[in-house]
Amino acid sequence: MAIARFDLNLLRNLDALLKERNVTSAAQLLQLSQPAMSNSLKRLRELFDDPILIRTSDGMVPTERALALQPMVREVLATVEKAVQPQTDFDASTSDRVFRIMASDYAESSLLPHVLRRLRAEAPDISLDIMTPSDVNFPDVEQGKVDLVMNRFDSLPQSFHQKILWGDSFCCLFRKDNPINKNFSLENYLAAKHVWVSKTGMGVGFGVNPDNVQRLGWVDEALTRIEKKRHISVFTRHYHSAMLLAQESDLIATLPSRATSLQQDNDQVVIRKPPFVIPEMDLTMAWSALLQHNPAHQWMRRLIVQVAKENCPEFLPEVTR
């Protein structure tokens, strides 16, 4: 029997006929007319090449074939019923789901601690599997293998959904005894040595070409606009490493403000506004279209957006410290 010839409603009628073993009772159960149910029985007999129900002195009795079909029919109907039912609400308080999130160390250190505190209060059994940008590629996200990615992105596939979590300004961080602290001017900034840090997007990174300004990012593009260039001594992909290098040497690290705010209580360093204008950068959250309507995923996205809005105010350093 070709599946193309089969009407799913016939399975529902067959289930009622085998349950009631009476055409009239089966019709009443499904709120159909008796002729309509009789016609269904006729079609079922033709499709299965079997009488299905046989009239005896004790009433209608299922055939051996019909009895074999009965549990399979009920399983199919139950599966279809489950498939067409609306998805139930996600109960975060009882869920033990693992969310896989790719986050730059900037997002991991400035946003995710706040997210974890909220999770501990609202969903204590949910776990986060946090991955680095080098662990993930775009196909992983597109196929739903990774729930969310959070980073600064130059571009994203058009199929991705995305949400800007916040915009961030830039700050300069250096040792308190760095000579530039006496006169933090643009001239002295350019004369100093710098640590560069960036890991935009995803995938394995490659070596940096200091002469390719467009690939160096926000800070160096801003300097190019005023026809200036800084001297970069160290290239790194980790914000914490950049801050440590600036603290332990004469290097200057120019970083997103929320990253430098992690050092605001460190009396060994100074945090200053840059001596030139750097446009804001965005922290973006992106995910696959496959997960767009998943209730658990929707809950997690809402939580992250709320946390980013409520618990992470912009850090604005004083001109001096």
Image (tube, rainbow, N blue to C red):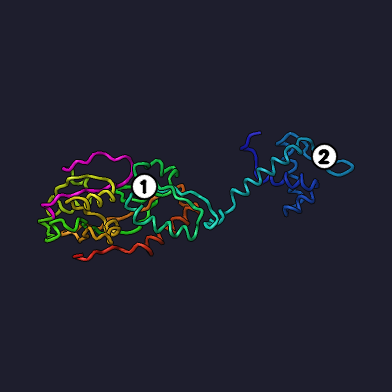
Membership of 5 in magenta stretch = no
Q: How crowded is mark 1: few (under 14 residues within 10 Å), some or many (20 or more)?
A: few
Membership of 191 in magenta stretch = yes
User: Which numbered marker is on residue 134?
Assistant: none
Q: Residues within 10 Å of mark 2 (few under 14, many from 20)?
A: few
Type of amino acid under label 2: Ile
Residue in the image at 31% along x and 47% along y: 155
- The C terminus is located in which quarter? bottom left
Looking at this view, is 40 or 99 the one in front? 99
Of badges 2 and 1, the one in the foreground is 1
Question: Is 273 left or right of 304, judged from the image as shown?
Answer: left
Position in image of residue 183 (x %, y %): 11, 61
Type of amino acid under label 1: Gln
Position in image of residue 9 (x %, y %): 67, 46
| Above or below, comparing residue 216 to residue 123 in the picture | above
Q: Name the residue under label 1.
A: 158
Looking at this view, is 68 or 217 the one in front? 217
Whether residue 281 is visible: yes
| Above or below, comparing residue 304 to residue 158 in the picture | below
The main secondary structure of the magenta stretch is loop
Question: Is 224 left or right of 57, judged from the image as shown?
Answer: left
Whether residues under marks 2 and 1 lie with C-beta atoms below 8 angstroms apart, the answer is no
Question: Is 61 left or right of 252, judged from the image as shown?
Answer: right
What segment carries the magenta color?
A: 189-211
Residue in the image at 41% along x and 57% along y: 115
Q: Mark 2 points at which residue?
A: 54
**Label 2's element?**
strand
Residue in the image at 61% along x and 37% along y: 4
Question: Is 187 left or right of 298, judged from the image as shown?
Answer: left
**Label 1's element?**
loop
